[in-house]
Amino acid sequence: MLRSVLFLALLALACAAVLRAAPDAPASSQAVTVSQEKTVALAASTREKSASKNQDKIWSALVFASNESNPKEAPAELREFAPKLKRIFGYNQFELKGSTAKPIDADGESWLVPSNNFWLSVRARRALSKEARGGYLLDVHLYLNERPLVATETKLAPGSPLFIRGPACGKGQLIIVLQVQR
């Protein structure tokens, strides 16, 4: 219980930082600043093999969800998720604050940076069970800047995204989305 409360408190602080940094700026214009040590670690951990077109990727996004009287249409990257997000979370407007996609490397760790403040470390291995439908078992570690927040293991299959509910933020809520892309 205490861990959940601490996690939500840290995410709330990050939410405030995200909104202060650039509430209306497009996600692609945001720069990521990290220490030199972190840059070296990221470069080493995200070495990408010369991949074929068929290599699976993991896509992550940071979404700000809210209820508006005149909601904007979801951005192209979120349109396939919008009906599920509305049904699950009850919001009618979704803004993409940042996203990234990386090839899945079964031999190493991938760092996904969906925004300036949030980082995801993902280690993936093929799931052997039929229930996984060709998906992966993921070891996921969520960071706020360089501070670890949560570590978990989950199954992620193509066509079955994972939504992580974040804290209430302003008039809405942060949501993290993970999906395997073929």
Image: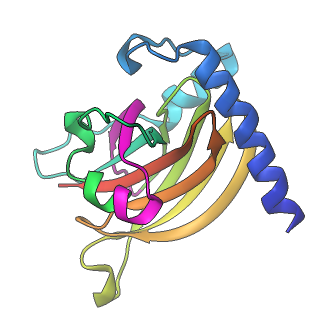
Residue 105 magenta-drawn? yes
Horizontal side, residue 75 vs residue 100: left or right: left
Single out the residue that lies furthest toward the front.
69
Seen in the picture, residue 110 relative to 106 is either above or below; the reply is above
Q: Is residue 33 visible?
A: no
Residue 149 point in image, percent of width and height: 73, 48
Query: What residue appears at the point 24 percent right and 65 percent down from the top-left corner?
Result: 158
Query: What residue appears at the point 50 percent right and 26 percent down from the top-left corner?
Result: 43
Residue 146 point in image, percent of width and height: 72, 31
Q: Is residue 174 visible?
A: yes
Q: Nearer the viewer, residue 70 or 119?
A: 70
Residue 171 point in image, percent of width and height: 58, 36
Horizontal side, residue 159 vs residue 111: left or right: left
Q: What is the magenta range?
A: 86-106
Query: What residue appears at the point 63 percent right and 33 percent down from the top-left corner?
Result: 170
Query: What residue appears at the point 53 percent right and 13 percent down from the top-left corner?
Result: 22
Horizontal side, residue 135 vs residue 41: left or right: left
Residue 49 magenta-drawn? no
Q: Nearer the viewer, residue 10 or 137?
A: 10
Quadrant in the picture for the C terminus: bottom left
Quadrant in the picture for the N terminus: bottom right
Seen in the picture, residue 166 relative to 76 is either above or below; the reply is below
Q: Nearer the viewer, residue 112 or 128?
A: 112
Q: How is the image coloured?
A: rainbow
